[in-house]
Image (cartoon, rainbow, N blue to C red):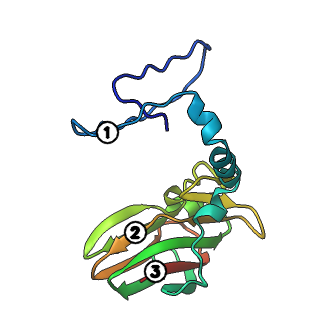
Amino acid sequence: PISYAKHCKVSCEAPDVYYHVNYRTYPEKTEVKTFVKEDLEHLSSQIKELAEQLRSPMKIAEPNLDAPGFSPAEFDLNISPGEEKTLRDVKGPSAVTSIWAVLQSDDLAAAARGLLLSMTFDEEETVSCPFGDFFGMAPGLQPYESLPMGVAQKPSVYPWSHWYMPYATRMRCTVKNYTVNKIHIHGVITLQD
């Protein structure tokens, strides 16, 4: 982030470049220290450490399952065409901290698009999308890593997510097969108390 108190101008002179810039506006009288070049030298060790961590985002966000309060639950299901199955249904308060899964089907791309993932928190459905889309897999099963999610390649191709999803009373996660093939899904949903 580049902090500024009064004004910031971002420009680009290169042709055919796409970039996006987000900004945050603070309430009046909020103290904001404007970024200066000297900050780069002063913060260089922290910048290098963060850059190194960002090389492997999956490891940064992985919950420490050895820490108290984490409860991973494994699922291993066969889902026939038209069938709906529950991956996890638990009472709260708690928070989902990670999900990973391996899909197996005669057509993996169709399975990733045709398996509907639904997540209900405190009796309100807040996720309803193709399984692969939730993990940013579309199009196809291309490996990538970002801070909240990705698709790993080893030991096999599998999507993972470290979205933090808290709830007060209940969390229910289901999948429904809208494809013409049977889908096998194996994975883990981890909660933190």
Q: Of label 3 and label 1, which has the lower sequence position?
A: 1
Residue at x-position 69% and y-position 46%: 48
- Find the residue positioned furthest to the left: 28
Q: Is residue 174 above or below residue 19?
A: below
Residue 132, given in percent of the width and then of the height, sits at 55, 59
What's under tag 2, amino acid-wise?
A: Met
- Classed neighbour count for the residue bearing mark 2: other residues with Cα under 10 Å, few (<14), some (14–19), many (≥20): some
- The residue that mark 1 highlights is 31
From the image, state whether disc 2 or disc 1 is nearer to you: 1
Residue at x-position 55% and y-position 16%: 12
- The residue that mark 3 highlights is 192
From the image, state whether disc 3 or disc 1 is nearer to you: 1
Residue at x-position 37% and y-position 64%: 127
Q: Of label 2 and label 1, which has the lower sequence position?
A: 1
CA distance for labels 2 and 1: 31 Å
- The residue that mark 2 highlights is 165
Residue 117, given in percent of the width and then of the height, sits at 44, 68
Residue 143, given in percent of the width and then of the height, sits at 70, 54
What's under tag 1, amino acid-wise?
A: Glu
Secondary structure under badge 2?
strand
| Residue 43 location, quadrant | top right
The quadrant of the picture occupied by the C terminus is bottom left
